[in-house]
Image (spheres, helix red, strand yellow):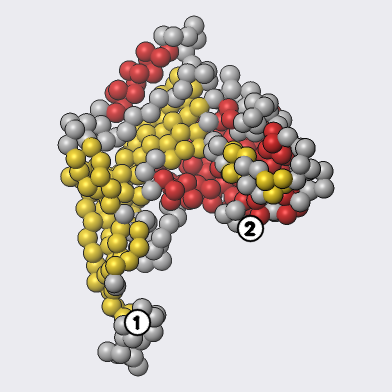
Amino acid sequence: MAVRSISICGEAVLDLHALNNEGAEGNALMTRMVDIVDGQGELHTVNAISGDMLKHIQAEHLYHHSMENGLPLCGACRTFDANRICADEEFTKHPEFTKETPDSTILSAALHKCTLDDIEGILITSEIGKSRSIARKSCVEFGWAVGIPNATRTESYFHVKYVPEGRGKGSGAGENLGQNIFHRPASSGVYAIVLNMDPMRVGRNDISLDYTVDAAGRQARIKGLIESVLNTFVRLNGAHRNTQLPHLVDFRGAIVVSTSSLPAPSLSALNPEYREQLAETCKNLNRLRDQASLTMTTFDNLSEFSGQMADLATRSDLAE
Ligand SMILES: [Zn+2]
């Protein structure tokens, strides 16, 4: 039974991080704050880490995995170029592509050539025979990591760049010269995490719905995807890690795996009963099939999460 979809919902306890900032006002760095509504309909403003940041971290882990394990990468992704295959001239200027070449053929060629374009998604807007706009939807989706109200705080800390020669002579012109003072945020809290993976879409053309990549290739790419999601929590990359490496204190939650067209359900940890609700939902959805196709496991710490993800990544039936 091939693994078709996976959802992970959880709570990460993360202390003293500044992973995600939205810019500076004067000499104060501002962290990302978002408005959310809890299960009782109450509005809260909380610190958050964007899904873009989390996905960037995961993509970087997948890049390293692909390089190490010889999974195919296009010329641009070999240097982790954010433009992906659109910046690979060997692809965009391929002599076999003319203005008559169907979009589905170009998309198949892109998926075949590159694991990152396949799994992370891409909008191919390059001039390939003619102007085109071919969308490849990502096979992995991250929501914001959002602070649970009353369990998340952000404070601002004062820093000085100490320069004995330039003491008192900060230029004030925004240049990084002389002795400068600045304020930097640090946030601590419990963050609700939601993410989905769609292994069934790995290597599959979005237009023709045919598999472009063979089963062995898909198996290797799906393994890389699951491993990169695990590594996202093993090593959180992001901003200001040289002096504010986040303390990951705990990680608990649930993993749901679906081996049928029933989607792996997802419920945010902003709802304190999310694990009980998810277990009941899986039970109810499983009644819709002769054979149970949804499996849910819960984890109470990083070691349990890593064990369950390693079990999942090393399944032999990921692709078929
Ligand atoms: Zn690529």
Q: Callout 1: 10 Å neighbours few (<14), some, many (20+)?
A: few
Residue furthest top as drawn:
290
Mark 2: few/some/many CA within 10 Å (<14, 14-19, 20+)? few
Q: Where is residue 55 in the image (x, y as percent from the top left)?
A: 47, 46
Q: Residue at x 25, y 27 (%)?
A: 273
Q: Which of marks 2 and 1 is in front?
A: 1
Closer to the chain start, of discs 2 and 1, is 2
For image coordinates 69% across by 49% down, the residue present is 127
Q: What residue type is labelled 1?
A: Ala
- Give above or below for 155 relative to 285: below
Numbered label attached to residue 173? 1
Q: What element carries label 2?
A: helix
Looking at the rendered structure, the kind of residue marked 2 is: Thr
Question: Does residue 265 appear left or right of residue 261 in this picture?
Answer: left
Tell me how far mark 2 sits from mark 1, CA to CA. Answer: 35 Å
- Badge number at residue 188: none
Q: Which residue is drawn at 37% across and 56% down?
A: 19
**In this rendering, is residue 13 above or below 309?**
below
Q: Mark 2 points at which residue?
A: 79
Q: Name, please, the residue furthest toward the bottom.
A: 165
